[in-house]
């Protein structure tokens, strides 16, 4: 999979075009104008062709006779993003997820460039169904072309390979934990993995020294989890990681007392990022608590880390992610409570004791888990959606308002 070029500002786009630094490729296509409504088939073909391996369509930049992008022609962008999204949803089978990104030109109301990011689709190939076309398309460095029967067959085989069992992957991540849950602590397991096959994902970051630098930059976001004594990326992995090709880091326990086993972060060469983080189970009288703020911040930091890493590797497709909270003992009920001005939730009640009247909601599964598939670009626009989604089932059992968990 090639790296995508996604300019973040008008200045970055215009500067690259004026300096001749960009050219059309299999993953980058420039269009002078957005096709008229009676040419939706052309737009559908562009989107379908780009969806096989992912790429970016940029509207508002024309090409010269040698197909070099040289002409800057900002467009009126009103309702254009919505129109292209509708084409992707209604003119292709199966429907395609795209991410339109307007770049507004300062000082000109409504004018700018429209980037359409098309992540490599797990559902490819996408058939163009508008105007009776009923064909599949692909793309190379010189443009679009109808796919052969063999091309379509290979993409269908890839679709099957990409339809992985996320629950099984989560089970595998849990099985590779550095140590089982201990007395007075739960274990939080988190993973993220690009859906597209990247057996050598880390090589996209460059040499081993550049890989280490990129991972250290991502892990700089975890300072509140680590102490100066934490082992850095590239240190010898725990014995449970025998045979793993990648980088690892050991972080001290998140338990407030500083006691307990360290947490482990592993970044594997195929792009799998996994964390195994101990969490304190607090006690007050006969009740046991988990600190919801601590849980949310651990997940939020994990999400920030894998998003930065994937962006550094030029990945902009779909990711699978999952969470498991293991080792919560004797769960009878769960409810959000405030204690010492900290948001916590009650996870256990001692057997044989009466359940207080105001703590009546049931949550009987002794290990909470959740998985999902999402576009990385969607998460970049609102990373807290990922945190909310990962915690949605648990938060729903606690107070039916998952969004209220995010400080």
Image (cartoon, grey):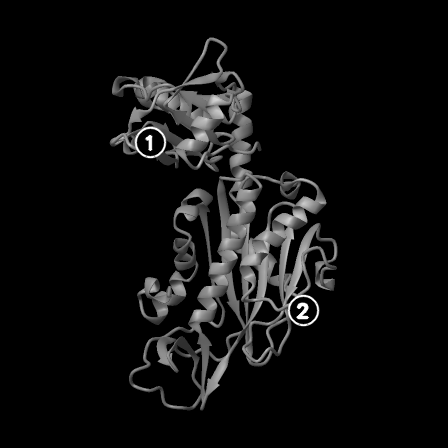
Asked if residue 165 can be seen in this view, the reply is no
Extreme residue toward the front, this view? 107
Front-most of 353 and 220? 220
Q: Nearer the viewer, residue 135 or 240?
A: 240
Q: Nearer the viewer, mark 1 or mark 2?
A: 1
**Of label 1 and label 2, which has the lower sequence position?**
1
Residues at marks 1 and 2, CA–CA distance in whole angstroms: 48 Å
Can you identify the residue that label 1 sits on? 105
Judge from the rendering whether residue 49 lies leftward or rightward of residue 400; answer left or right.
right
Measuring from the top left, give residue 45's x and y in whole percent. Answer: 40, 21
Quadrant housing the C terminus: bottom left
Q: Percent position (x, y) of residue 108?
A: 27, 30
List the single residue furthest toward the top.
Answer: 65
Q: Residue at image x 49%, y 27%?
A: 16
Residue beneath the point at 74% across and 53% down: 243
Residue beneath label 2, please?
229
* Residue 184 image point, x, y percent: 55, 80
Q: Secondary structure at mark 1?
A: loop
């Amino acid at each position: 999979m090639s790296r995508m070029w996604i300019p973040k500002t008008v200045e970055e786009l215009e500067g690259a075009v004026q300096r001749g630094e960009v050219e059309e490729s299999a993953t980058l296509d420039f269009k002078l104008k957005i096709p008229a409504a009676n040419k939706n088939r052309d737009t559908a073909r562009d989107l379908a062709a780009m969806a096989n391996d992912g790429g970016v369509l940029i509207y508002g930049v024309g090409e010269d006779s040698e197909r070099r992008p040289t002409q800057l022609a900002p467009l009126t962008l009103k309702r254009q993003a919505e129109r292209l999204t509708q084409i992707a949803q209604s003119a292709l089978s199966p429907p395609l997820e795209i991410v339109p990104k307007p770049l507004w030109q300062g000082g000109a109301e409504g004018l700018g460039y429209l980037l359409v990011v098309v992540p490599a689709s797990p559902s490819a190939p996408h058939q163009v169904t508008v105007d009776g076309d009923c064909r599949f398309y692909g793309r190379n460095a010189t443009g679009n072309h109808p796919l052969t029967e063999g091309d379509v067959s290979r993409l269908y085989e890839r679709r099957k390979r990409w339809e992985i069992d996320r629950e099984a992957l989560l089970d595998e991540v849990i099985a590779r934990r550095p140590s089982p849950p201990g007395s007075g602590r739960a274990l939080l397991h988190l993973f993220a993995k690009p859906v597209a096959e990247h057996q050598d994902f880390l090589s996209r970051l460059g040499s081993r020294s550049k890989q280490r630098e990129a991972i250290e930059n991502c892990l700089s976001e975890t300072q509140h989890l680590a102490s100066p004594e934490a082992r850095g990326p590239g240190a010898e992995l725990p014995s449970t990681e025998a045979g793993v090709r990648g980088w690892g880091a050991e972080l001290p326990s998140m338990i407030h007392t500083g006691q307990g086993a360290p947490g482990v972060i592993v970044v594997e060469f195929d792009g799998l990022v996994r964390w195994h983080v101990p969490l304190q189970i607090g006690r007050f009288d006969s009740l046991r608590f988990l600190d919801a703020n601590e849980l949310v911040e651990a997940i939020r930091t994990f999400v920030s880390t894998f998003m930065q890493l994937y962006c550094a590797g030029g990945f902009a497709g779909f990711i699978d992610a999952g969470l498991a909270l293991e080792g919560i003992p004797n769960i009878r009920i769960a409810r959000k409570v405030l204690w010492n001005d900290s948001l916590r939730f009650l996870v256990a009640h001692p057997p044989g004791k009466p359940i207080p009247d105001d703590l009546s909601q049931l949550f009987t599964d002794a290990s909470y888990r959740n998985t999902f598939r999402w576009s990385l670009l969607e998460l970049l626009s609102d990373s807290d959606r990922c945190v909310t989604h990962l915690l949605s089932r648990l938060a729903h059992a606690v107070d039916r308002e998952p969004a209220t968990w995010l400080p």
